[in-house]
Amino acid sequence: MTLNNTDKTAPQEEDIILKVEHLSKVFGRRKEAANEMLEKGADKAAILKSTGVTIAVDDVSFDVERGKVFSLIGASGSGKSTVVRCLNMLWRPTAGKILFENEDIGQYSAQQLREFRRSKVSMVFQSFGLLSHRSVLDNVAFGLEVRGVKKQERLDKAMEMVDMVGLNGWENKDITDLSGGMRQRVGIARALANDPDILLMDEPFSALDPLVRQSMQFELISIQQKLNKTIVFITHDINEAFKLGDRVAIMREGRIVQIDTPEDMTVNPADDYVRQFIQSADKAQIYYAKNFMQTPTCLVHIKHGARAALQQMRDNGMSSAYVIGDGMRFIGVIPLDNAFRVRAGEMTFDEAIVRDTPTTTQDTLINDLLPIASQAKYPLAVLDEDNRLKGILSKAAVLTALL
Amino acid sequence: MADWLTRFPEELHLNIQAPIDNGINYMVENWGGFFDGLSNGLRAILRAVQDIIDFVPWWALVIIVFAATLLTTKKWPRAVLYSILLVSIGLIGLWDELYDTLALVITSVFISLAIGFPLGVLISFSDRANKIVRPILDTMQTMPSFVYLIPAVMLLGLGNVPAVIATTIYAMPPMVRMTSHGLRQVDTEVQEASLAFGATRLQMLGKVLVPQAVPTIMTGVNQTIIMAISMVVTCSMIGATGLGSEVIAGMNRLDSGRGFAAGIAIVILAIIMDRITQNMVKEAKSSDA
Ligand SMILES: Nc1ncnc2c1ncn2[C@@H]1O[C@H](COP(=O)(O)OP(=O)(O)O)[C@@H](O)[C@H]1O
Ligand SMILES: [Mg+2]
């Protein structure tokens, strides 16, 4: 079996906070028999059938860089949850090592392991794993309480975390009063309260509906930028993996198929499986120009001329203005340098208008706009069927929509 | 046709009666000290419970039932109804018997919970302990209770003390089962979360598992109480005093009225204790769901 799990974007040794070396995890009793079959090249299904042993994770290695988000993605049953539970020894690996800052955490005593879990690493769960008999605040304070932090101190700290995840005012509510998205905010606040170095997140947003999921992703990014935590983020959604991950590892049947940055993975998928995964991303998410366009600013009526255009550009801090006729009908774009030339008398206002700039309609698929937007000098003008300017779409907006 | 095919061959007799008799006799002769100690200990607990109950005047008990019903069901007509039912036990002349029975039931339930809860915790943690304890629980519950009344009497004599033992044996299993079941069924991610934040086993038990299992554990308490009450008549056959002995007396003298009166009193006691504890279960669930 050929394996392409070479990691071309491997980080520098000193930046690595967590190192996973040849991790394997096997469920079942007849491990030796299973190992024998595995060495002979039998596949997972055959091994399960004849020995009753599940090979959940098979020889997985990767490095996690400090302060970065490492996404681990794969179909259901590919072994993601198993990997992440080995990272804090909730489940003992069958083979392989987990090195945290070069210490083999598999060698920790029960006491050391508890210390490690209390201060270095915390976890966020798919179905939240919250204590339904406690209030929001007492849930957030759980880790500190277990650590023996004094009551007032831990409640203060917990309140700070509740604030950070935007649940101010909900701190005394029961968990059962909260929506799914709010519950996961509690989960995140609880995980951050211990001020851990690493956050392990096992499909934290998979149970949430798409809109809530998007806002949670956004929030996680901003929290990560503020606190600079290292995050191991598990998901089965390639969009999510690409949006959040600095680097992404794809798992299939217990093995890692490819580790790369989202960009490199898109350009150079290691095999057909990865390619399919990435293609599924585009199909899974259908967005139109109207979903991402912004309200047009920096408009100038054709009657008003270059001076007004310059004024608009100055006010809006832009380097081009949209020239319109009556009823917002789109005529073209006037770039800043052209406007200056008109003022200097080098060309007429009419000549200064660029009329062949690419435009699009509101119902064009964002995917189809990628080649146009990446070539365009100015944000795309989004027009309706009567040529009326409805919005503008920047290159950045198109790219974020695709990730 | 051969004889042994139609009729069970009596030559194949396996004598288990003699060894059991011998075993019990051996215990009676040689472990007398232990059983005396056990007997004295139980008598002391029973005595203490009796003293506490006797300290409560009749009207105070009525108020307690009224308040407990109101608190758990939040329905005052129910509270009034149960108070009237309780008073009617006194009206039919069985108030003192009620107190004797209450002492027996409360003592047995107390011991059942005190042993059953830790045992339930133990078998929820250890699969091996689970494998050993489960069949014992099954036997305790399905063995006709008369059967162990005999050795109980031989070892502890007649009266309320062996009755406490017999009742405890019969009433404890649901507490063990429900405690263990409640602890085991706590959501996996909730358990993982507490470990992932570095909780010790004891912290996990006290801060996570038991609070999460309270509704199920309360169901166990409720079942234990009902089963203890259902043993009242049986226990009177080995000399337990109270409502049960009234039923037995009614039977011996073919006095239906006397038997029914005591029977109704037992039913009233059972209903009141069942409803109050059942609503405590509901309460625990609704604050949890
Ligand atoms: N406790 C367990 N006992 C036996 N098999 C398990 C256990 N946990 C997971 N598995 C198996 O291991 C494989 C990987 O599971 P998991 O790590 O949960 O995958 P994922 O999180 O990617 O969906 C699956 O085939 C699953 O059935
Ligand atoms: Mg999973």
Image (tube, coloured by chain):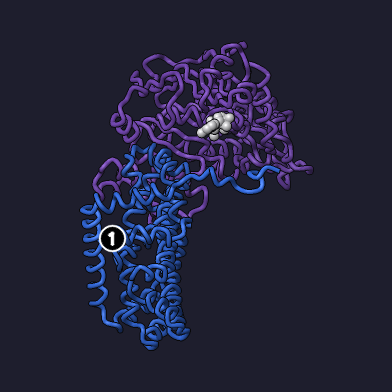
The secondary structure type at the circle numbered 1 is helix
How many residues crowd around disc 1 within 10 Å: few (fewer than 14), some, or many (20 or more)?
many
A146 on left or right of B215? left
Extreme residue in the right direction: A385
B187 on left or right of B167? right
A147 on left or right of A234? left
Q: Which chain is blue?
A: B
Ligand 1 is in which quadrant of the figure? top right
Q: Quadrant of the C terminus of chain A?
A: top right
Rendered residue at 50%/35% (across/down): A202
Q: Amino acid at mark 1?
A: Leu
Residue B109 seen anywhere in this rendered image of the structure: yes
In the image, B211 versus A354, the foreground residue is: B211
Q: Position of residue A119 (x, y in %)?
A: 31, 34
In the image, A295 versus B167, the foreground residue is: B167
Residue B21, relative to residue A306: is it above or below?
A: below
Residue hosting label 1: B156
Colour chain A is painted in: purple
